């Protein structure tokens, strides 16, 4: 990967951190006042180890960030985050085309009769942030 591509990827990761961290700060401050707030950060070990994802700090989330001109790689990016996701984690792919808006691919469970099907869905960042806040709240309720 070239230096310009790495720099663009790093800028994308920092942009996502700037979107997600305030949600974490707000929910944590409200629900766990006085407790240390998790700090989301870029995963620097991913350059040296396979099966790693971009954003770390929440043990239940495997967040991969992609920023590029061509979205033809979305299938391989999704496979990448699925391969890096550990048991108990939610795979989350956040991506955008240059000059476009951020979108998110994640798994959605839907009940069909007695079974629950898990399907990949692509949603807007606004919809994802609603889900993200609810998921944070649910995780905090489980540790109380």
Image: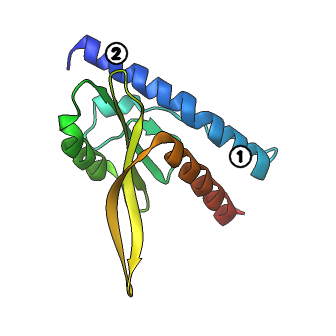
Can residue 133 be seen by looking at this rendering?
yes
Residue 52, horizontal then vertical, whole percent: 32, 41
Q: Residue at x 37, y 58 (%)?
A: 107
Question: Tag 1, which secondary structure?
Answer: helix
Residue 15, horizontal then vertical, whole percent: 49, 25
Residue 61, horizontal then vertical, whole percent: 46, 50
Image: 141 above or below 12: below
Q: Is residue 130 left or right of residue 91?
A: right
Give the distance between the C-alpha atoms of the residues marked 1 and 2, in whole angstroms.
31 Å
* Residue farthest along the right direction in this orientation: 34
Q: Is residue 140 left or right of residue 132?
A: right
Q: Quadrant of residue 100?
A: top left
Q: Which residue is mark 2?
A: 7
Near mark 2 (Cα within 10 A), the count class, few <14, some 14-19 or many ≥20, is few
The image's mark for residue 77 is none
Q: Earlier in the sequence, mark 1 or mark 2?
A: 2
Q: How many marks?
A: 2
Q: Nearer the viewer, residue 26 or 123?
A: 123
Image: 60 above or below 76: below
Can residue 58 be seen by looking at this rendering?
no
Cβ–Cβ under 8 Å for marks 1 and 2: no
Q: Quadrant of residue 20?
A: top right
Question: Where, quadrant-wise, is the C terminus in this rendering?
Answer: bottom right
Q: Is residue 86 left or right of residue 75?
A: right
Q: Quadrant of residue 143?
A: bottom right
Question: Where, quadrant-wise, is the N terminus in this rendering?
Answer: top left
The image's mark for residue 28 is 1
* Residue farthest along the top direction in this orientation: 4
Q: Residue at x 23, y 49 (%)?
A: 79
Q: Residue at x 34, y 23 (%)?
A: 9
């Amino acid at each position: 990967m070239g230096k310009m591509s790495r720099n663009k990827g790093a800028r994308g990761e920092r942009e996502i951190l700037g979107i997600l961290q305030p949600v974490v700060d707000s929910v944590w401050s409200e629900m766990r006042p006085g407790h240390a707030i998790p700090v989301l950060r870029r995963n620097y070990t991913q350059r040296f180890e396979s099966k790693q994802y971009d954003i770390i700090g929440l043990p239940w989330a495997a967040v991969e960030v992609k920023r590029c001109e061509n979205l033809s790689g979305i299938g391989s990016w999704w496979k990448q985050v699925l391969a890096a996701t550990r048991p108990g984690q939610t795979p989350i792919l956040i991506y955008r085309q240059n000059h476009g808006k951020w979108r998110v691919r994640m798994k959605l469970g839907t009940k069909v009769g007695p079974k629950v099907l898990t399907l990949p869905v692509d949603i807007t960042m606004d919809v994802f942030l609603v889900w993200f806040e609810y998921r944070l709240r649910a995780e905090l309720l489980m540790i109380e």
